[in-house]
Image (cartoon, grey):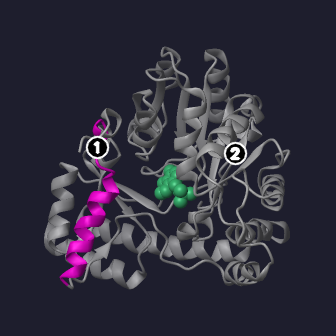
Amino acid sequence: MKYSRRLDSLPQYPFAKLDSILREKKARGVDLISFGIGDPDLPPPDFVNEELRQALKTPGSHNYPSSEGESFFRKAVAEWYRRRFNVELNPDTDVCALIGSKEGIANVIRAFVNPGEQVLTPNPSYPVYEHGAALLNEAHPRSFNLRDTEGFRPNLENIAKEDFKFLFLNYPNNPTSAVVDEDFLQQVSRLADEKGALICYDNAYSELTFKGYKAPSILQVPGGMDVAIEFHSCSKTFSMAGYRIGFAAGNPEIIKGLKAIKSQVDSGPPKFIQQAAARALLSYVNSNPPKEVLDRLSVYERRFMILTNGLKEIGYNASMPLGTFYLWVNVGENSESFASKLLERDVVVTPGTAFGSEGDGYVRFSLTVPDISIEEALVRMRDALG
Ligand SMILES: Cc1ncc(COP(=O)(O)O)c(C=O)c1O
């Protein structure tokens, strides 16, 4: 059987490769410690699961949802934006529910980009921008580098020289953990406006921030709403990764395009999942952020301390970032050979090259591992690297 050229043009999804190595090791009963995938180990807050149980009893919750999301869910998103970013959204026109933000990121391109047209993606980055969004839609991805010396932010002067239809940006950033301020977002919005281009702003980690830093929304800066669609996820904030729910908000014309594509290919997240996610978002009404989110942040912060201190003792430069639950470490050698050395001791990290060529020399640790396992991993790493 012959696959399409489109599929043949795609490399394997990096985490699929990692997943199969892990499955094989687990099948052999190996005691693996995996910092590989950003899949929260902490469970969702109890009140979210309680809402889910209630939602399952709601008459009609088994019926098809609408692909744009139920009205109550879109209203909860708008309320969350008001509380969190002081941004007013029309829940009917400016919000769309997603079956996880991953599908929205891949689908929005189909509404605006013709085959061969250029989209700009960061290098390194979450692989879905280049593969799922650009290549699957036969767009032409062109990457711009994120470098440590520039705070892992794009050089806007270089971007201004490019012609492009869509620009992907993601802060707090996966994999580098870099963050930006409102001023940067305003400059980017102005640039997109001058170029007649659109911005896909991935804010999946907006709630995972530390040391008093608050991640801004691109929709809160002047001009942002004219050019951007912003993606959020309940996967990280509320540990709801397996529930598959996220949402997009922003310019109503972009949202309209996304909804039009989605109406042809999916029927939205299950109503009972939307009900649980709406409850999670509305917890910001009483307390911003709610205790359950703060509790998660202190767990991640403690894990960062253990890992960064341990890595420093081994001789690596590592410090607690302002956002995400990832630690991006310059290992001073080829990232795949470094990751292989750790894998031999049954410690899994993601080689930086999984996020693009500029990731070489780095590995990413996902702090979705309990303290005791981090300590055990440090013992193994000392052995493997000493
Ligand atoms: C930067 C970024 N965006 C989006 C996603 C997708 O999240 P979701 O679970 O909402 O599809 C991820 C998941 O790891 C991510 O790292």
Q: Which residues are magenta?
A: 8-28
Marked residue nearer the N-terminal end (1 or 2):
1
Q: x, y percentage for residue 181?
A: 64, 41
Horizontally, is 274 left or right of 346 in the view? Answer: right
Other residues around mark 2 within 10 Å, as few (<14) / some (14–19) / many (≥20): many
Q: Nearer the viewer, residue 58 or 26?
A: 58
The C terminus: image quadrant? bottom left
Q: Nearer the viewer, residue 98 or 171?
A: 98
Q: x, y percentage for residue 140?
A: 41, 25
Q: x, y percentage for residue 243?
A: 58, 69
Q: Which residue is at a point 49% across and 71% down the rendered structure image?
A: 40
The N terminus: image quadrant? top left
Residue 39 versus residue 70 in the image, above or below: below
Other residues around mark 1 within 10 Å, as few (<14) / some (14–19) / many (≥20): few
Residue 213 appears in view: no
Quarter-of-image position of residue 79 = bottom right
As helix, strand or loop, the secondary structure at mark 1 comes to loop
The numbered dot on residue 217 is: 2
Q: Nearer the viewer, residue 287 or 38?
A: 38
Q: Which residue is at a point 60% across and 57% down the rendered structure image?
A: 99
Q: Which residue is at a point 69% across and 52% down the rendered structure image?
A: 67
In reply to whether residue 11 is colored magenta, the answer given is yes
Residue 58 appears in view: yes
The secondary structure that dominates the magenta segment is helix
Q: Nearer the viewer, residue 39 or 139?
A: 139
Quarter-of-image position of residue 43 = bottom right
Residue 298 versus residue 323 in the image, above or below: below
Q: Which residue is mark 1?
A: 11
Residue 231 versus residue 341 in the image, above or below: above
In reply to whether residue 140 is colored magenta, the answer given is no
Is label 2 within 8 A of ligand 1 (CB to nearest ligand atom)?
no
